[in-house]
Amino acid sequence: MSLPSFHRGHGLSVMVGNQTGECCFAFLGLSNNLQLQSLLFVLFLLIYLLTIVANVMIMLAVKSNPNLQNPMYFFLSHLSFLDVCYSSVTLPKMLETTIAKQKTISVSGCFAQAFFILFSATTEVFMLSSMAYDRYCAICKPLHYVNIMNIAFTWKLVATSWSIGFLYSLANTVPLTRLEFCGSKIIKHFSCELPSIISLSCSDTSMNQMLFFISGGTVGIVSFLLTVVSYIHIISTILRINSTEGRQKAFSTCSSHLIVVILFYGTGYFRYLRPSSASSVVLDEILSIQYSILTPLLNPIIYSLPNKEMKASFKKMLKW
């Protein structure tokens, strides 16, 4: 068995194993400047801690406040848990590699990270679709809302979101184990997202790319259509309300969710489903920072700031 050798690339120390190349990958990272790396480490550590604290506070607020025991806050609590998972998949490793001399990750660790990124992101888009349907029932069918959005049905929506996320991520990451990586092992990114891994393989990746595009397109279109159709009905119902105050109140109940949907869907879908010819390392990193790092932090802020009940619950928790 040949001993591992070390190669230099882009200022990184990359460990490469034998001909099968099953040792590890290396991240290109955001910068090679030591001062900038220290600044980025502090910045993203602060973002991670704030993300955890903000989302955990929402989960505790929903759990402890009897006034928040309804489907809207039930989904919001699960969304907060997803945001904690999503941030924890990417940020700890990103913080480690930001200041480490060897910005490496094992092949199995990289595949696992890709799995959980897809798992968290896909579950989140369907959770957002469930929340859109909940707002549709609340605004368009208020008299039947309690019967439609009962406890059993809300749990089915949550379970379906998690199941779709698991199956989708499993279907796209298991085929990665058949690929060979015999060339450059530098991932031009800060995390193991699927397109970045596939681009490094020296095997024929046409089936992987086709599977990813078809499954991703199907998941994306289905979840997006569910959300769009719900909001078409919601907006048409709001426009038929006679009083200005009534329209404002109805719109305020779904405006936060709409902002989150635009931020998450817009950046995530553009990152994954655009043609490879439009790919750019810098653009990919900016988009990934938005939907995988900033969105989990912005979600609790967007949902809690305009919400009087949520703010009142936070105040009680802080006093306690």
Image: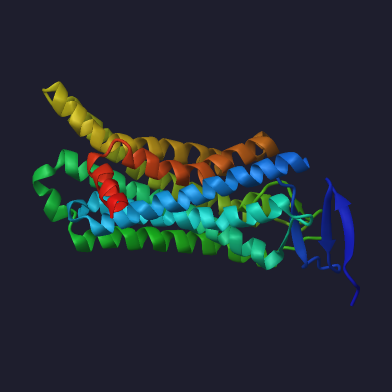
Name the residue rendered at 67%, 67% in the picture: 108
Residue occupying image coordinates x 39% and y 55%: 56
* Front-lying residue, 93 or 223: 93
Asked where in the image residue 285 lies, by quadrant, the reply is top right
Residue 73 locus on image (x, y percent): 26, 51
Residue at the outermost left position:
143
Image quadrant of residue 135? Answer: top left
Residue 122 in view in this figure: no
- Pick out the residue farthest to the bottom: 1
Image x and y of residue 139, in percent: 18, 39
Residue at 74%, 40% (x, y): give it: 35
Q: Is residue 100 left or right of residue 126?
A: right
Q: Looking at the rendering, in which quadrant would you find the C terminus?
A: bottom left
Asked if 79 appears above or below 230 in the picture, the reply is below
Horizontal side of 301 relative to 316 (left or right) equals: right
- Residue visible at 77% across and 43% down? 34
Picture coordinates of residue 288 (x, y %)?
58, 43
Of the pair 56 and 239, the residue shown nearer to us: 56
Check the picture and name the quadrant holding the N terminus: bottom right
User: Farthest front residue?
Assistant: 319
Observer able to see residue 45: yes
Specify whether 236 is left or right of 300.
left
The structure's colour scheme is rainbow
Could you say where residue 87 lies in the image, as x and y percent from the top left?
52, 53
Q: How many marks?
A: 0
Say which of 13 and 282 sits in front. Answer: 13
